[in-house]
Image (cartoon, rainbow, N blue to C red):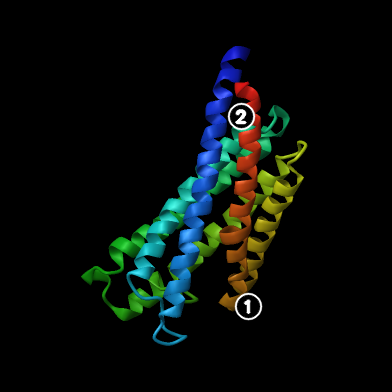
Amino acid sequence: MGNMIVASQPAAHRFGIATALAIAFLTLVYAVVLAIGLLTLPSPNHPIQNPWFTLMEVLIMAIAPTMVAFMVALHQWVPQERRALSLSAVVFMAMCAVVTCTVHFAILTLSRQSTFADPTIVRAVFAFQWPSVAYALDILAWDFFFPIAAILAGASLGGEGEKAVRWLFVASGLLAFVGLVGVPLADMQLRNIGIIGYLLVFPVAAVLMAKRFNCEGEKSAA
């Protein structure tokens, strides 16, 4: 049984590296598309136009499941005594992914249907303007479920060479939690602080973790 576990380690590490690099790539593409969308706005108060908006929706639906897969790889990595924390991180990241993918899939498939053509319905249900159903659910995903997952992931790490990754995970979670302040204050500019957590800090942590996967994978394969 022990030999089987050792033999599986390189594959698990490769999976972790692949998912970490995928997160970094997808979030970078998302940031570029977001920047282009903002730069091409007809006016500051105008929503991001297509094709940029649709591309952003598709990218989010790719990023979230990839983050779940990365958390699974991290769970495989951590020592047995910390796996309750890492497994909890997997669960909360999966909750984030399910909620946000549901939101963005509904926007892509339903918001353009004639049944929902009424501007009042579109504004109340699908618009990323506060308050709306889609915005509330996306905040639940990225400013509640995601930060819990990120902080738990950081808490599950404790080995040599993992200090920087651990604190980056925690920092990404804390920044995302700050986004919740925008809800009671009805100020979505504050909510945007959370974007730094999951669009910038978390991918950096994932890439650093990929380096740890790679080093350990080379040791296991030797």
Crowding near the residue tagged with mark 2, few <14, some 14–19, many ≥20 C-alpha atoms within 10 Å: some
Residue 212 picture quarter: top right
Placement of 92 over or under 78, stated as above or below? below
Question: From the viewer's perspective, is 9 left or right of 40?
Answer: right
Which residue position is annotated with label 1?
185
Q: Could you tell me which secondary element the residue under label 2 belongs to?
A: helix
Q: Position of residue 74 (x, y in %)?
A: 61, 38
Placement of 78 over or under 65, stated as above or below? above
Inspect this view and state whether residue 63 appears: yes
Q: Residue at x 50, y 57 (%)?
A: 27
The disc label shown at residue 217, or none: 2
User: The residue under label 1 is which amino acid type?
Assistant: Leu
Q: Residue at x 58, y 65 (%)?
A: 195
Residue 175 picture quarter: bottom right
User: The residue under label 2 is which amino acid type?
Assistant: Gly
Q: Residue at x 50, y 40 (%)?
A: 18
Q: Residue at x 54, y 64 (%)?
A: 139
